[in-house]
Amino acid sequence: MTYLVTGAAGFIGSHLVDRLLARGEQVIGFDNFVDYYSPDRKRRNLAQAMQQPGFTLIEGDIRDPDTVAHIFTRYRPRFVAHLAAMPGPRPSIANPQLYEAVNVGGSLVILDYARRSEVENLVLASTSSVYGKTNRVPFREDDNTDRPLSPYAATKKAAEVLAYTFHSLYGIPTSVVRFFTVYGPRGRPDMTPYLFVERMVRGQPITLFNGGENLFRDYTYIDDIVSGVINALDRPHPYEIFNLGHSQPVELRRFVNLLEQITGYPAQIEIKPLPATEPPITYADTTKAGQLLDFAPRVAIEEGLARFWAWYCDEHQPQH
Ligand code: NAD
């Protein structure tokens, strides 16, 4: 079976590619190596995949209909995991047009060619950011998502809505998966824990909004997220939205203490007020994903951070 993974060189995409290849699938990875963070890092993410005969890398932009048409006609992927996006709520404020063009316009191109080639199942990556801060916790898929706090969140919500419209017009089975703060090896350098660890190792201060108190994030380990995406690919639903989160929010203050214990580096803390783009808590209700996708996160935060730290040390070893 042929799978198309957009955003294949990114943090989550590259792990998904590795897992699909490990079970013997043919995988087309599609990525434009945008310099949101180091393109070299992204190439390293794909180092294992590039050795596998089942993997084909297409470098290009999801906004470019010619490249997307070429992929669908030449390789005829039956399953699509659409992960390519401009990520991050805060950076989206400076460049909302780019976020709109990629996350909405680019998603539209992918949806359009997916329906023309009648794919068997499409999984769209969305985010806990769509819940904003007005909701009760834990967040449920049918909660109000009409008040996103950043252009990023608004564009991801718009992509969800477009995916619904394409499903209703053309019947493509579609699962939207809302990820909650994913972390682990190959983690994005603009996200915790990478951002914090890098600064702690260099003896630089880290910024903790509200001093990290009463600020909770539902940290979810990468392998658990990939299992959820694979199960969503394996089990087509007409149209469903699923939370993929650990469902055990960690207070930021405790998160930093854990990083100090695991790395052995002390954190110097700079306190700033919570920006308007950030909700005080994210917390996934995963009952639905548990029932329909057998989603069951397994990796505890202590274990996940230890694995992240091992990868970080390896990544920063002097090259010979
Ligand atoms: P990432 O930046 O590591 O991966 C995204 C990939 O998409 C990158 O490799 C990038 O080069 C590629 N890309 C960007 N614009 C593109 C374009 N125009 N054409 C082709 N490729 C393009 O980010 P990630 O953390 O792996 O996120 C993957 C998906 O998961 C995104 O849709 C993101 O919004 C979503 N998500 C991530 C998190 C998280 O905690 N990491 C949380 C919620 C949602």
Image (cartoon, rainbow, N blue to C red):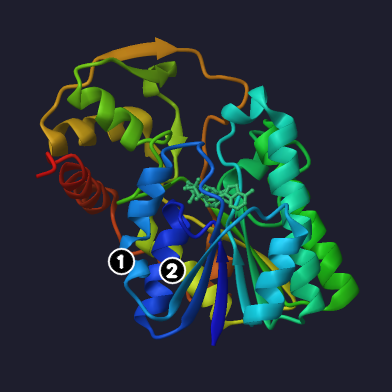
Q: Amino acid at mark 2?
A: Val
Question: Quick check: can you spot residue 242?
Answer: yes
Q: Earlier in the sequence, mark 2 or mark 1?
A: 2
- Across and down, in percent, residue 135 comes to 66, 40
User: Toward the viewer: 167 or 111?
Assistant: 111
Q: Residue at x 17, y 48 (%)?
A: 310
Residue 48 lies, with reference to residue 201, above or below; the image says below
Q: Identify the residue position indicated by label 1 in the image.
A: 48
Question: Of circles 2 and 1, which is in front?
Answer: 1
Marks 2/1: CA distance? 10 Å
Q: Residue at x 64, y 53 (%)?
A: 61
Is 138 on the left-hand or right-hand side of 113? Answer: left
Residue 134 lies, with reference to residue 249, above or below; the image says above
Is 204 on the left-hand or right-hand side of 295? Answer: left
Disc 1 packing (10 Å; few <14; some 14–19; many ≥20): some
Is 14 on the left-hand or right-hand side of 73? Answer: left
Label total for image: 2
Q: Amino acid at mark 1?
A: Gln
Q: Identify the residue position indicated by label 2 in the image.
A: 17
